[in-house]
């Protein structure tokens, strides 16, 4: 009897700790299908903070809203310290495979390589979008179609 009780208690603890790891899954996006670890070549800047991460996301959102067409994705930061970057596709059928998610990240890499900070550091041909995210202090990047596909990258 005690063995069954302790086995159930252990399963409950394991389930709760798995849920605590990503409390945004199931709310902002489906449980991730793909997870990977990216070993960033960049260390967080000393000035990286919740405020700078929120400002970064706000700037991207404002630029997307200025376009003549509706945004194809929403981007926001979550977590106690806004350390989780979340990208949710808003158009069905466009962000539904790992390959399309990686293509989006490749496009984002091409865009960030033109930023002055990459030019100043001389890393425009080496660093990726994930390195920029790490510079800013993000610890996780999640991309989803908001329906049935989620890819999560943990930055280390």
Image: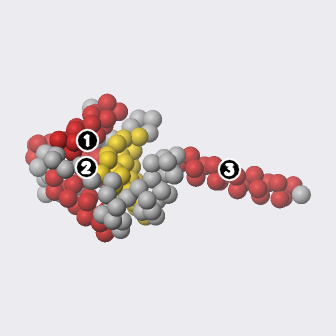
SS state under label 2: loop
Q: Are marks 2 and 3 in contact (CB under 8 Å)?
A: no
Q: Which mark is residue 85?
A: none
Residue denoted by label 3 = 13
Q: Mark 1 and mark 3 in contact (Cβ < 8 Å)? A: no
- The residue depicted at 34 percent of the width and 61 percent of the height is 92
The answer for how far apart the CA atoms under marks 3 and 1 are is: 38 Å
Foreground: 110 or 60? 60
Q: Which residue is mark 2?
A: 71
Spatial CA distance of label 1 from label 2 is 9 Å
Residue 6 image position (x, y, % from top left):
79, 54
* Frontmost residue, 28 versus 19: 28
Residue drawn at x 27%, y 36% is 58
Residue 44, given in percent of the width and then of the height, sits at 30, 41
Query: Which of pointers 3 and 1 lies earlier in the amino acid sequence?
Result: 3
On residue 61, which mark appears? 1
Alpha-carbon neighbours of circle 1 within 10 Å: few (<14), some, or many (≥20)?
some
């Amino acid at each position: 009897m005690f063995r069954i009780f302790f086995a159930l208690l252990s399963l409950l603890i394991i389930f709760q700790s798995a849920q605590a790891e990503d409390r945004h899954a199931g709310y902002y996006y489906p449980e991730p299908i793909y997870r990977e670890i990216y070993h960033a070549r960049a260390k967080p800047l000393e000035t990286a903070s919740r405020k700078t991460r929120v400002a970064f996301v706000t700037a991207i959102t404002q630029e997307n809203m200025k376009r003549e067409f509706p945004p194809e994705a929403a981007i926001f930061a979550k977590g106690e310290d806004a350390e989780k970057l979340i990208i949710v596709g808003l158009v069905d059928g466009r962000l539904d495979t790992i390959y399309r998610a990686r293509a989006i990240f490749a496009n984002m890499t091409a865009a960030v390589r033109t930023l002055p900070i990459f030019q100043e550091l001389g890393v425009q041909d080496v660093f990726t979008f994930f390195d920029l995210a790490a510079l800013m202090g993000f610890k996780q990047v999640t991309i989803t179609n908001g329906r049935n596909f989620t890819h999560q990258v943990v930055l280390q």
